[in-house]
Image (tube, rainbow, N blue to C red):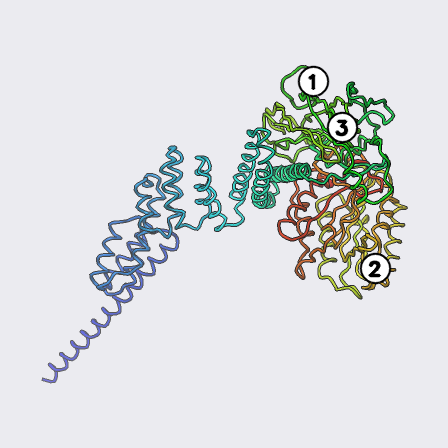
């Protein structure tokens, strides 16, 4: 009995041991399969990993991990049958559907699409429908498919579906391109703006937005061409204002495109062209506005006073004398008999110095003294005297354009003449009549004088006038402008004198041959700069009496760093005065030291950043040194603009440029200078230019720790400029428009008065042009 019980106990013990050993083996087997599966998965052997996951699931059917990880391996292995089986079994065992299966099914789809044979139109459409959060992944290949097959309509519908649900700016941009090409301009504007909402730095969207507004502006200009003369008189102001508004809308987008990629020289050229056109249209508006004023006062009765006519330069003439139109000598005989008209022709050539100056300022023409007493009283009495003058009646006739060489179009390198006759059929003298030319477009390389002053015309007299026009050939250093294709350029012409007597407006068409690219055949000429570039920096933050500034010194140093890095400036030729050094004695000492070093081929750039002051009593502007008192009772430490100009005149350089970021710094300029000219030409003549952050107004110092608006846009343009030679007029146009668009300031860029300016321009020479 005992032996039987012992036998049963022994058997029970062995049974328990065997059962326990079997339980440990199931767990160990499951872990072994899971371990192997994960090792296969890590090395992307998804098929082998799937087999071990299936074994683990069979070993322990109640563990969910093997189902989920196995389904993921099946998705990457693109084994749809096994994936669906695991999904069904999981749902059956655990009585719910894991969201992971939806995610894994997309993984399986993507694995399937890695095989090009599976990338069909229907598969991609279904993928977009099922997985809209990743629509960008499937929409891209589908769009490529449509574009390759030229199925633009299908591509448009797909993009219209995708743009609202994807974050990639390329989809909105691409739809904008399709809209723009199909002339759906409003749709294109909406899409480009959506692209910029997603990516404000999208260069192509910025560029194309700029082209839309620019082309709308050109459309307005073309609309002017269709107007009759009567319609032009009444509608030009409105249309020109709409043109300027559109160009100003275009400018920030083009600016963004140009500054985003320094290699995008086409965007920079586009920016230059836009700036020129803005300036051109604004000046056309000013000329037209001046003709409508009712003030009939005499500007001057004195031979020594030079009546200034506003002028827009379209470029630099190919020779110093091109476009130079003057009257004959004041001593030339004229007749006052109504029955016998004076038939002298205006063809005299000015002296070299006059013709050079005319590139930037109105040509000085002697004015014949009228046969009335010369008033020695103020302007009010002159106006009263004007009321007693008999009226002149200006008649313009025989207007035509004569192409040199007998051709019928003006090609690059060619020239011609605008010919007309001006007569006075009135009873009074026409004082300082001026021929005013209004071109519809600003065409780079087309050179002519926009305001040509004539001598006085007595009653019954007349004169023949010729105005030379040239069309410059492209060259390496004249790049930086995008050609405006305007095969026919309409010119409107009128004559107006100082008493606001004016002729009827007439017009003619100038046919231009603009075939070929401006860059065709142009070879980039690496020039060796003559002379040395000197840089003078004067800036003050820490005033003792005046309100301290936050950014003056920082702005000056920022400007210095830009020039040292990007242009031909060396540290040893940089002179700096900051804070307590900014006083009259130190400035005087610096200028005198500099004068001993500079030569006739050198260039000096003076940059001032600090307080400025304008005394309305003396009508003179001042720099405010660090120790200047803030009172009119003691202005002994103020530095007058007159002294600054004397310093500049004393520096015997080829070019001197004064850049002043200060309040009331616009009081030292000469008459307005307009237009962009070729750098190689203007650099050959002496220049004395100034660029100020404003006129006779206060200007902004900017937020503390940043830069003034003036300095910000000044240095931005210098950094982004890709051209070997950058003229100060180009820089001034950009700074002026940019600052005016973002502040209440109005920067000024013009030649300085009475300091030896001879018609040239200061040119910045880039170290590594594109």
Residue in the foreground of this view, choosing between 266 and 286:
286
Please tell me whether residue 61 is drawn above or below residue 323 in the rendered image. below
Q: Nearer the viewer, mark 1 or mark 3?
A: 3
How far apart, in angstroms, are the residues tagged by discs 2 and 1? 60 Å
Residue 366 seen by the camera: no
Q: Nearer the viewer, mark 2 or mark 3?
A: 3
Please tell me whether residue 562 is drawn above or below residue 298 in the rendered image. below
Q: Nearer the viewer, mark 2 or mark 1?
A: 1
Of marks 2 and 3, which one's residue comes earlier in the chain? 3
Q: Residues within 10 Å of mark 3 (few under 14, many from 20)?
A: some
Q: Residues within 10 Å of mark 2 (few under 14, many from 20)?
A: some
Q: Label 1's element?
A: helix
Of marks 2 and 1, which one's residue comes earlier in the chain? 1
Q: Label 3's element?
A: loop
Residue in the foreground of this view, choosing between 683 and 664:
664
Q: Is residue 367 left or right of residue 14?
A: right
Q: Label 2's element?
A: helix
How far apart, in angstroms, are the residues tagged by discs 1 and 3? 38 Å
> Based on the displayed image, in which of its 4 quarters is residue 760 positioned?
top right
Residue in the foreground of this view, choosing between 156 and 36:
156
Residue 395 seen by the camera: yes
Residue identified by numbered label 3: 427
Residue identified by numbered label 2: 581
Residue 455 horizontal/vertical position (percent): 80, 28
Q: Is residue 199 left or right of residue 271?
A: left
Q: Which mark is residue 404?
A: 1
Q: Is residue 142 left or right of residue 555?
A: left
Q: In which quadrant is the C terminus drawn? A: top right
- State the residue lying farthest toward the left: 1
How far apart, in angstroms, are the residues tagged by discs 2 and 3? 65 Å
Of marks 1 and 3, which one's residue comes earlier in the chain? 1
């Amino acid at each position: 009995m005992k032996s039987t019980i012992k036998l049963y106990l022994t058997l029970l013990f062995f049974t328990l041991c065997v059962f326990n050993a079997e339980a440990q083996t199931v767990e160990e087997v499951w872990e072994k399969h899971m371990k192997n599966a994960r090792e296969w998965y890590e090395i992307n052997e998804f098929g082998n990993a799937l087999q071990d996951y299936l074994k683990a699931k069979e070993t322990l059917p109640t563990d969910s991990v093997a189902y989920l990880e196995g389904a993921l391996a099946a998705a990457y292995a693109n084994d749809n049958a096994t994936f669906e089986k695991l999904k069904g079994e999981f749902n059956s065992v655990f009585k719910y559907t894991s969201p992971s299966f939806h995610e894994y099914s997309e993984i399986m789809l993507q694995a399937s699409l890695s095989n090009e044979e599976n990338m069909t139109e229907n598969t991609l459409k279904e993928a977009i429908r099922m997985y809209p959060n990743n629509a960008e992944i499937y929409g891209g290949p589908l769009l490529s498919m449509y574009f390759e097959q030229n199925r633009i309509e299908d591509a448009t519908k797909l993009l219209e579906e995708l743009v609202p649900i994807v974050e990639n700016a390329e989809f909105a941009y691409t739809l904008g391109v399709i809209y723009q090409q199909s002339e759906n301009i409003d749709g294109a504007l909406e899409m480009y703006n959506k692209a910029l909402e997603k990516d404000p730095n999208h260069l192509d969207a910025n560029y194309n937005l700029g082209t839309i507004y620019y082309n709308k502006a050109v459309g307005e200009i073309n609309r002017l061409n269709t107007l009759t003369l009567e319609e032009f008189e009444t509608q030009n102001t409105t249309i020109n204002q709409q043109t300027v508004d559109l160009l100003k809308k275009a400018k920030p987008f083009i600016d963004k495109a140009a500054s985003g990629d320094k290699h995008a020289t086409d965007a920079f050229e586009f920016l230059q062209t836009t700036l020129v056109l803005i300036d051109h249209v604004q000046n056309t508006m000013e000329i037209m506005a001046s003709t409508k004023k009712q003030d009939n006062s005499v500007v001057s009765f004195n031979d020594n006073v030079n009546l200034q006519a506003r002028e827009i330069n379209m470029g630099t003439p190919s020779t110093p004398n091109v476009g130079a139109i003057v009257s004959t000598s004041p001593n030339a005989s004229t007749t006052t008999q109504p029955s016998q008209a004076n038939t002298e022709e205006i063809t005299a050539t000015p002296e070299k110095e006059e013709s050079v100056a005319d590139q930037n300022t109105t040509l000085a023409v002697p004015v014949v003294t009228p046969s009335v007493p010369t008033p020695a009283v103020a302007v009010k009495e002159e106006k009263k005297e004007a009321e007693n003058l008999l009226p002149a009646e200006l008649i313009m006739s025989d207007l035509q354009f004569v192409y040199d060489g007998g051709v019928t179009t003006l090609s690059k390198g060619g020239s011609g003449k605008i010919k007309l006759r001006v007569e006075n059929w009135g009873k009074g003298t026409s004082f300082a009549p001026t021929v005013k030319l209004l071109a519809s477009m600003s065409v780079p390389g087309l050179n002519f004088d926009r305001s040509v002053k004539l001598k006085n015309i007595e009653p019954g007299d007349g004169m023949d006038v010729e105005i030379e026009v040239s069309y410059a050939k492209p060259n390496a250093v004249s790049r930086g402008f995008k050609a405006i294709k305007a095969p026919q350029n309409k010119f409107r012409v009128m004559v107006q004198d100082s008493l606001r007597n004016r002729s009827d407006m007439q017009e003619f068409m100038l046919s231009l041959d603009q075939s070929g690219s401006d860059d065709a055949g142009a070879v980039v000429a690496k020039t060796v700069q003559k002379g040395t570039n000197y840089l003078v920096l004067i800036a003050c933050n820490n005033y003792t009496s005046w309100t301290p500034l936050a950014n003056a010194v920082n702005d000056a140093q920022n400007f210095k760093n830009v020039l040292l890095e990007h242009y031909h400036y060396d540290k040893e030729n940089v002179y700096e005065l900051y804070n307590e050094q900014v006083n009259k004695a130190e400035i005087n000492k610096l200028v005198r030291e500099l004068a001993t070093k500079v030569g006739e081929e050198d260039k000096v750039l003076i940059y001032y950043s600090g307080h400025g002051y304008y005394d309305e009593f003396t009508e003179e502007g001042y720099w405010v040194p660090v120790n200047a008192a803030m009172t009119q009772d003691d202005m002994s430490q103020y530095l007058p603009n007159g002294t600054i100009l004397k310093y500049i005149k004393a520096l015997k350089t080829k070019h001197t440029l004064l850049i002043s970021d200060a309040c009331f710094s616009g009081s030292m300029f000469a008459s307005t200078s307009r237009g962009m000219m070729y750098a190689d030409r203007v650099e050959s003549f002496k220049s004395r230019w100034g660029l100020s952050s404003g006129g006779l107004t206060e200007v902004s110092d900017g937020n503390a720790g940043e830069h003034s608006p003036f300095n910000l846009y000044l240095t931005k343009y210098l950094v982004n400029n890709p051209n070997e030679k950058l003229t100060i007029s180009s820089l001034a146009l950009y700074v002026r428009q940019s600052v005016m668009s973002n502040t209440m300031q109005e920067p000024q860029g013009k030649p300085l008065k009475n300091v030896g300016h001879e018609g040239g321009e200061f040119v910045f020479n880039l170290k590594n042009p594109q």
